[in-house]
């Protein structure tokens, strides 16, 4: 399964602190030797201020209570720098922590800067010190303090580049604290800035979109309704173009969202074309499962890929999230994926055959005979399919189910509305971009 591990590809587009949860998952799943994971952690930590954590891992890796002198020296340096930054930012921090003083701030940033300078002798140097202090706190692993200071800094900052950097930092901090509601708000705000901002180069904007999608994986696979949010972001024209240009491995997560989200079926045909276009640059069992079903109509191949899909999900840091229920551990997304994937196979099989052999169907669904019969009975009942089970002959007989003319009009109208909506958005974005350039 290490062949399907995307950690190295994904880590290249993350803040180094966001890589730690991925390494923790890999260590828990024992996908790599433990020493290899510990060395990767130390390599990451050496570029942060989390010196105590690095010392603990060093002791665990080398089975010793001694640590290198450079780690000891580094710790002294970090503590001294932290104290210095705290003193520089102290006047502004004191003001912000005083409820009565904080109420004096207004939405007008220029007013705030003038007021702080006139009444409290707080100027641009102290505001810059607050940013550096917040950033240093983040590097030390104090994500809660960093998030608070970065939020306050953005309320005072008039430099758009520095404000954007602070927003990225706050998003990372909220993700690491698993504050998914707040993280989603920051993500949406960041997306709005990226899509509306006049970047110096298209390449820079492309890179920002790719970073945003990678960071969003933490949120969408932990937030309620996140898989719909992932679809809305990843399958939007400019973002799917970014995926195809520079991050085709993200197709795994979009393919998963397609399988588990029944409401997205109308766009499935369009997505299958994307999978076909990118099959030479990226493929894995999840994308190949869809290709087997909807390009080659290969049910045997789909069945084989479905078994591999389960292993991919269990060993993916975003898809393989475990939930403890009493004495049992479950992987909700795995169960949801398999249920919907079997439905995909069943629907495809029904398009080809009107009379279905139960034994053959059980084999295609990777279930035993009794499990397959119960699954089909529940499917017929819940989905209100026009089908009957003949227990004596062991078959399922499908009744023809063609859309009447009114239903056809409704389905075609829905598809047309979606295309019109996309075109309108493209025209508006082009107009805004042109207006920004002319302005």
Image (cartoon, rainbow, N blue to C red):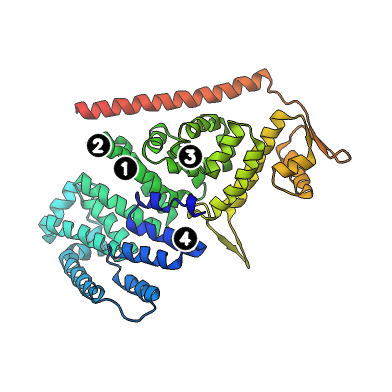
In the rendered image, which residue does mark 4 sit on?
Answer: 26
In the rendered image, which residue does mark 1 sit on?
Answer: 208
404 left or right of 227? right
Q: Measure the alpha-carbon separation of dots 3 and 4.
A: 26 Å
In the rendered image, which residue does mark 2 sit on?
Answer: 199
Q: Residue at x 46, y 43 (%)?
A: 230
For marks 3 and 4 on the same chain, the one whose residue lies earlier in the sequence: 4
For marks 1 and 4 on the same chain, the one whose residue lies earlier in the sequence: 4
Q: Of residues 260 and 269, which is closer to you in this image? A: 269
Q: Position of residue 23 (x, y in %)?
A: 42, 61
In this view, the residue farthest toward the right is: 392
For marks 3 and 2 on the same chain, the one whose residue lies earlier in the sequence: 2
Q: Residue at x 34, y 39 (%)?
A: 192
For marks 4 and 2 on the same chain, the one whose residue lies earlier in the sequence: 4
Where residue 346 sits, quadrant-wise, is top right
* Vertical placement of residue 386 versus 405, above or below: below
Is disc 4 placed on a helix, strand or loop?
helix
Q: Residue at x 35, y 46 (%)?
A: 211
- Observer-side mark, 4 or 2, equals 4
In the rendered image, which residue does mark 3 sit on?
Answer: 231
In this view, the residue farthest toward the top is: 405
Q: Measure the alpha-carbon separation of dots 1 and 2.
A: 10 Å
Q: Position of residue 364 (x, y in %)?
A: 70, 41
| Callouts 3 and 2 close, C-beta under 8 Å | no
């Amino acid at each position: 399964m290490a062949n399907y591990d995307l950690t190295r590809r994904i880590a290249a587009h993350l803040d180094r602190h966001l890589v730690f949860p991925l390494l923790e998952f890999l260590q828990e799943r024992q996908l790599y030797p433990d020493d290899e994971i510990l060395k990767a952690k130390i390599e990451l930590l050496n570029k942060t201020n989390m010196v105590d954590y690095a010392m603990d891992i060093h002791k665990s890796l080398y089975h010793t209570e001694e640590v290198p002198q450079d780690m000891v020296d580094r710790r002294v340096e970090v503590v001294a720098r932290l104290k210095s930054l705290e003193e520089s930012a102290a006047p502004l921090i004191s003001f912000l922590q005083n409820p009565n003083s904080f109420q004096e701030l207004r939405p007008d940033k220029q007013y705030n800067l003038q007021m702080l300078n006139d009444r409290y002798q707080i100027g641009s140097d102290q505001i810059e010190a607050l940013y550096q202090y917040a950033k240093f706190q983040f590097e030390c692993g104090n994500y809660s303090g960093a998030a608070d200071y970065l939020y306050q800094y953005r309320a005072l900052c008039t430099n758009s580049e520095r404000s954007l950097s602070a927003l990225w930092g706050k998003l990372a901090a909220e993700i690491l604290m698993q504050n998914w509601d707040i993280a989603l708000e920051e993500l949406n705000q960041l997306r709005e800035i990226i899509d509306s901002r006049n970047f110096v180069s298209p390449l820079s904007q492309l890179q920002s979109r790719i970073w945003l999608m990678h960071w969003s994986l933490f949120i969408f696979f932990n937030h309620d309704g996140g898989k719909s949010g992932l679809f809305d972001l990843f399958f939007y024209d400019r973002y799917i173009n970014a995926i195809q240009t520079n991050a085709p491995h993200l197709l795994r997560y979009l393919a998963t969202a397609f399988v588990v989200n029944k409401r997205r079926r109308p766009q499935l045909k369009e997505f299958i074309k994307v999978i076909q276009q990118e099959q030479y640059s990226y493929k894995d069992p999840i994308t190949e499962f869809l290709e087997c079903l909807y390009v080659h109509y290969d049910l045997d191949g789909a069945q084989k890929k479905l078994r591999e899909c389960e292993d991919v999900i269990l060993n993916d840091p975003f898809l393989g999230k475990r939930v403890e229920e009493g004495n049992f551990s479950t992987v909700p997304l795995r169960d949801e994926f398999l249920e919907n994937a079997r439905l995909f196979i069943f629907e495809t099989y029904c398009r080809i055959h009107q009379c279905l052999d139960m034994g053959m169907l059980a084999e295609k669904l990777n279930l035993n005979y009794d499990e397959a019969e119960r699954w089909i009975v529940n499917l017929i009942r819940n989905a209100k399919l026009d089908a009957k089970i003949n227990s004596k002959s062991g078959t399922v007989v499908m009744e023809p189910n063609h859309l009447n003319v009114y239903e056809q009009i409704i389905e075609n109208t829905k598809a047309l509305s979606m295309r019109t909506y996309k075109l309108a958005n493209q025209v508006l974005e082009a107009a805004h971009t042109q207006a920004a350039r002319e302005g």
